[in-house]
Image (cartoon, rainbow, N blue to C red):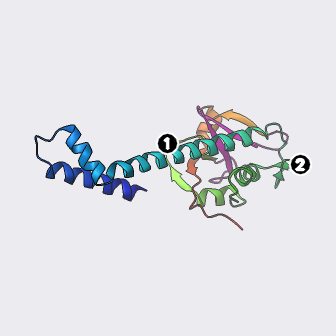
Amino acid sequence: MSRWFIALLLTCASAAQAAPSAASPEDIERFLADKGLITQLDEVRHSVADKAHVVADRTADLIGNAMGFIGVPYRRGGTTATTGFDCSGFVRAVYEKTVGMVLPRKADQQAASTEIIDKKELQPGDLVFFNTMRRAFSHVGIYVGDGKFIHSPRSGSEVRVEDMRQSYWQRRFDGARRVTVEAKAQP
């Protein structure tokens, strides 16, 4: 996709250099149409717009599915809504249900198999990790936007949304990750 766009820009730039400086906008448009570049540009625009819609729809589905589990009890080692979730079991279930991707079972493995991003780059659907057990990446949740994340916190609790700006979570923040198609899924 990006190669086509770059090629199109280079072609337009070379065409602009080759065109006489007195060429009118209509002459340039006719030249681009004769070379089929306007059609290619329209195809690129539509493709980018279609992909943006797919990403937005997938993110909305992901967050919607995650929110559907609010109130499910925490259960150590839990991986289903029926029996309860631990933090990584919750994240894994949401991603499997929404996009068909099976993430690794443990929080630290999920961190290792996803793309590192800066906290400032967080977008809904990204994973947020915390050190809650005196070891890195011992807790994981799904970022939902506006500084909040959804997770299955601990025994005696339920899946819920919390604010990452609370001092407890700020002190324990370990990093943010993005699940990409290249993420190492588990069989």
Tell me residue 104's x, y (percent): 69, 61
Q: Secondary structure at mark 1?
A: helix
In the rendered image, the quadrant that contains the N terminus is: bottom left
Q: What segment is highlighted magenta in the picture?
A: 131-158
As drawn, the residue found furthest toward the bottom would be 187
Residue 111's disc is none
- Residue density around tag 1, few if under 14, some if 14–19, many if 20 or more, within 10 Å: few
Mark nearer the N terminus (1 vs 2): 2
Using residue 148 as the reference point, say whether residue 41 is left or right of it. left
Using residue 30 as the reference point, say whether residue 169 is left or right of it. right
Tell me residue 187's x, y (percent): 72, 68
Q: Secondary structure at mark 2?
A: loop
Q: Which residue is mark 1?
A: 121
Q: Residue at x 85, y 40 (%)?
A: 156
Taking the magenta stretch, the answer to whether it contains residue 141 is yes
Q: Amino acid at mark 2?
A: Thr
Q: Which residue is mark 2?
A: 82
Circle count: 2
Q: Are marks 1 and 2 in contact (CB under 8 Å)?
A: no
Using residue 178 as the reference point, say whether residue 16 is left or right of it. left
Q: Is residue 48 above or below residue 160?
A: below
